[in-house]
Image: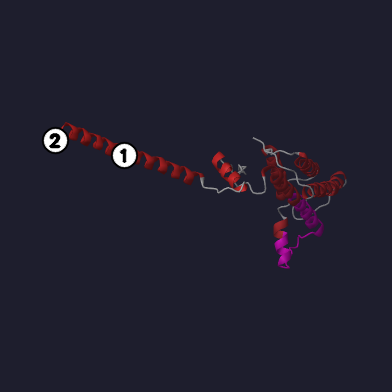
Amino acid sequence: MTTTAPRTRGSGHGLTYAMLGWAVAYGGLRLVWTVGPPPEFPPFGSDLLGFTGWRSVALCLVAGAVTVALDRTATWRPALAGLAWIVAGALVAAAAILLPELVSLLLFAPGPSFDPVAFASRLGCATGAALLGLAVFDYQRRTRGDCPRLLPHRPTRPPTLDARAVGTLGGVRGGGRARHPLRRAGRGGLRQRGAGRLHHRVGDRSGAGRCAVAAGAGAPLG
């Protein structure tokens, strides 16, 4: 099931342009090193791990293409997001030596095999991974919402008034004395119940009087 969300301008296109610029610059550098004589970087002979030569160029091209696909897709596609995360993870794995080098630089103890050019290349590869990760986050925010853990928004129905309440409001506007519809109905019911009881009592008394008159008429006079 795919969901759509209104697209926000600004950050998404900026990330796409930055990622394309990175793909052109860093991919061009990898292309130059692939076509020409490749430099030797101790201690592994290469600046990246696993992605050397044309594989590094292809990785840059795939990263740029995935970023463009994320920017132009307006619906949530799990396969596209998964592919983007795989490419970002490949870029991080290729620059895995960057972490121990950063620690050695923070401790002011770089090893004898430290090469500034290789360090800059690994830093550039990690930068591409960070940009691609931000692009995936922006894609998820656009298509799935800022906070997926929140409950979906449900539209609320406006409160409605029944016919009695509308009539009461009309009486107030017309200058008449308004009463609560339930209270008015309750008072009417009480009046009807009281009238029924009174009629029943009067009927009982009139019947008893008639019986007394009839009994006196039938008795002998003294």
The span picked out in magenta is: 101-129
Q: For mark 2, what is the residue?
A: 221
User: Which circle's residue, 1 or 2, is located before the other in the chain?
Assistant: 1
Q: Is residue 190 left or right of residue 68?
A: left
Q: Is residue 164 left or right of residue 213?
A: right
Percent position of residue 40, x then y: 81, 52
The amino acid pointed to by label 1 is: Val
Q: Which mark is residue 71?
A: none
Mark 2 falls on what kind of element? loop
The amino acid pointed to by label 2 is: Leu
Label 2: how many Cα within 10 Å (few below 14, some 14–19, many 20+): few
Q: CA distance from mark 1 to mark 2?
A: 30 Å
**Residue at the extreme front:** 222
**Is residue 191 something that shows in the picture?**
yes
- Residue at 76%, 50% in the rendered image: 131
Q: Is residue 87 left or right of residue 23?
A: left
The residue lying toward the viewer, choosing from 154 and 115, is: 154
Mark 1 falls on what kind of element? helix
**Residue at the extreme top:** 218
Q: Confirm whether the magenta stretch covers residue 165.
A: no
Label 1: how many Cα within 10 Å (few below 14, some 14–19, many 20+): few
Percent position of residue 171, x then y: 58, 45
Q: For mark 1, what is the residue?
A: 202
**Residue at the extreme left:** 222
